[in-house]
Image (cartoon, helix red, strand yellow):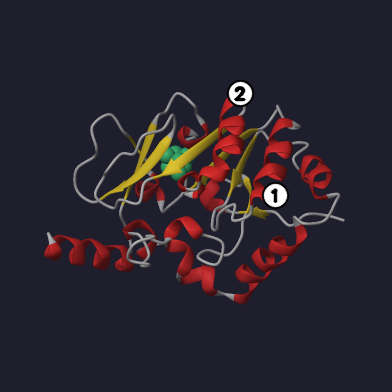
C-alpha cells in the first residue's frame, strides 16, 4: 500500500505528511480556560484551502492509515529520494503510538532531514519519544510557542509568532516576502537555528492580535 504524502509549492515541493488541524491538536487547548491558545486561534490550517474536501480527505485518510502494520516501512520507501521532509503542515502527533512510529521512520531515513513542529511537548508522556527524536542527527523537532507576540519558550529548537518586533536572537522566516514559499530557505530543518520566528499574517491572526492588545 502507498502512503499519502503532499507536495506543495509553499515548501519548494518538499513532501509532507499531515493530519487535519484541531481534531489532532490536543496541545492547542489551554487546560485552564479550555480555549484555543492564541497561536492556534489564528491557525492557517483551519481556513482557506484547508477547508476544501480534497485537502481534508487525505488528512482523514492518514489518521487511519498510520495505524496499519506496514506504515513505517511504506513511509521509509516513500522517502527514498527525499533529502528534506516536513511532518504536520497541519495537525499534530495526537497519539503516542503515532509518535513512536514517526520516530522509527526518522531513524530509518538518515539521508533525509526531518522537520517536525509540535505542541505535544506539553504532555509528559511524550518526553521520551521527543527527546529520542531530537537526538537523531537528521531531525529537528521544533517546539511551538503559543504566543503571537514573540514569546520564546525553552527548548533546543523552537518557534514563535511575532507581530511587530522580531524577538531577540530569533531567525526571521521570510516566507511572507515570497508569497508564503520557502524559496530555498531550510532554516526550520537546521538544528543550529534555535528559534524561528514567523511573522503573524492573515485576517484571522490580525483579529487575535487586536483582541490581545485590547485586553493588554
Ligand atoms: S524559516 Fe525558512 S524553512 Fe522555515 S518556513 Fe520559513 S522559509 Fe521555510
**Image quadrant of residue 73?**
top right
Dividing the image into 4 quarters, which one contains the C terminus? bottom left
Where residue 17 appears, x then y in whole percent?
65, 52
- Quadrant location of the N terminus? bottom right
Disc 1 or 2, which lies upstream in sequence?
1
* Residue 183 in view, yes or no: no
- Horizontal side of 61 relative to 23 (left or right) equals right
- Residue at 27 percent across and 43 percent down: it is 151
Q: Is residue 27 shown left or right of residue 202?
A: right
Q: Which quarter of the rendered image does ligand 1 occupy?
A: top left
Q: Which residue is mark 2?
A: 137
Residue density around tag 2, few if under 14, some if 14–19, many if 20 or more, within 10 Å: some
Q: Say whether mark 2 is within 8 Å of ligand 1.
A: no
Foreground of the two, 114 or 69: 69
* Image x and y of residue 206, in percent: 25, 64
Question: Does 22 sit above or below residue 14?
Answer: below
Q: Nearer the viewer, mark 1 or mark 2?
A: 1
Camera-side residue: 14 or 166?
166
The residue at which mark 1 appears reads as: 97
Residue under the image location 40 percent in, 29 percent down? 194
Q: Position of residue 53 (x, y in %)?
A: 62, 76
At 43% from the left and 52% from the top, the residue drawn is 180
Q: In the structure shown, which secondary structural element does the residue marked by tag 1 occupy?
A: helix
On screen, residue 64 above or below 13: below
Q: Is residue 102 visible?
A: yes
Is the residue 204 above or below the residue 4 in the image? below
Asked if residue 67 lies left or right of residue 202, the reply is right
Query: Does label 1 point to a residue whose CB lies under 8 Å from ligand 1?
Result: no
Q: Quadrant of residue 157?
A: top left
Amino acid at each position: 500500500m502507498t502512503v499519502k504524502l503532499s507536495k506543495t509549492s509553499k515548501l519548494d515541493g518538499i513532501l509532507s505528511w499531515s493530519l487535519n488541524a484541531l481534531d489532532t491538536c490536543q496541545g492547542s487547548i489551554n487546560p485552564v480556560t479550555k480555549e484555543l491558545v492564541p497561536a492556534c486561534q489564528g491557525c492557517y490550517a483551519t481556513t482557506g484551502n484547508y477547508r476544501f474536501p480534497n485537502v481534508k480527505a487525505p488528512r482523514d485518510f492518514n489518521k487511519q492509515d498510520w495505524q496499519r502494520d506496514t506504515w513505517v516501512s511504506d513511509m521509509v520507501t516513500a522517502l527514498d529520494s527525499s533529502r528534506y521532509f516536513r511532518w504536520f503542515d497541519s495537525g499534530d502527533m495526537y497519539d503516542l503510538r503515532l509518535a513512536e512510529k514517526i520516530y522509527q521512520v526518522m531513524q530509518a531515513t538518515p539521508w533525509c532531514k526531518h522537520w517536525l513542529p509540535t505542541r505535544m511537548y506539553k504532555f509528559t508522556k511524550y518526553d521520551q519519544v521527543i527527546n529520542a527524536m531530537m537526538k537523531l542527527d537528521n531531525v529537528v523537532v521544533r517546539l511551538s510557542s503559543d504566543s503571537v507576540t514573540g514569546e520564546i519558550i525553552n527548548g533546543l529548537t523552537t518557534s514563535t509568532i511575532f507581530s511587530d518586533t522580531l524577538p531577540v536572537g530569533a531567525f526571521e522566516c521570510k516566507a511572507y516576502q515570497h508569497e508564503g514559499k520557502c524559496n530555498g530557505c531550510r532554516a526550520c530543518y537546521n538544528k543550529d537555528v534555535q528559534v524561528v520566528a514567523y511573522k503573524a499574517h492573515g485576517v484571522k491572526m490580525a483579529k487575535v492580535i487586536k483582541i490581545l492588545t485590547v485586553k493588554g
